[in-house]
Image (tube, rainbow, N blue to C red):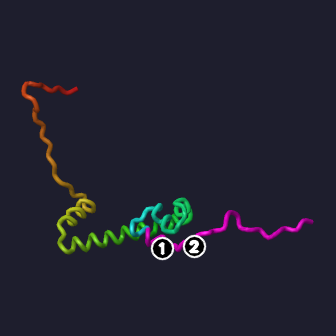
Amino acid sequence: MKKIKDKKPAGRPKKYNIDTEQVEKLASFGCTNVEIAAYFGCSENTIRRNYGENLSKGREKGKIRLRQMQWKAADKGNVTMLIWLGKQLLGQADKSEVTWENPVDGVEFIDV
């Protein structure tokens, strides 16, 4: 009977010490995968493959923080922010009218 050796983990051992909280923090600031990879000294592929969940979580935290800042600006009476939030959340839009004029006298336009 053949003796079975202890199995080693498949693949190369991890050589990067990447803090998942730091990945989330950088993603929440809007850093790209390439920028985060450069910060840790690894490839973008490593960040994307191994820390995708942290990237998503961080980016969502960044969106929440941005939304909080927008509401604070609107609460302080920032008219531009109030208009923007109205368009985004309430479906409001600028009213635009289109009028057609004959641009050249003597030229008749026909529908095709």
Name the residue at the right extreme. 1
Which callout, 1 or 2, points at the residue further toward the start of the chain?
2
The image position of residue 44, as x and y in percent, is 52, 60
Mark 2 highlights which residue? 17
The answer to which quarter of the image holds residue 59 is bottom left
Which part of the image, by quadrant, shows the C terminus? top left
Q: Which residue is mark 1?
A: 22
Kindly indicate the quadrant of the structure image that contains residue 45. bottom right
Q: Secondary structure at mark 2?
A: loop
Whether 105 is drawn above or below 7: the answer is above
Q: Nearer the viewer, residue 105 or 109?
A: 105
Image-based side of 59 in relation to 16, left or right: left
Q: Amino acid at mark 2?
A: Asn
> Residue 94: which numbered mark, if any?
none
SS of the residue under disc 1: helix
Pick whichever, 74 or 42, lies toward us: 42
Q: What's drawn in magenta, residue-wise?
A: 1-26
Callout in the foreground (1, 2): 2
Please tell me which residue is depicted at 48% across the width and 68% down the height of the picture. Answer: 39
Q: Can you give x and y, in whole percent of width and height, for residue 70 in the image?
A: 27, 69
What x and y, as percent, mark residue 107? 11, 25
Is residue 95 or residue 16 the one in the foreground?
Answer: 16
Looking at the image, residue 1 sits to the left or right of residue 36; the answer is right
Q: CA distance from mark 1 to mark 2?
A: 11 Å
Q: Disc 1 residue type?
A: Gln
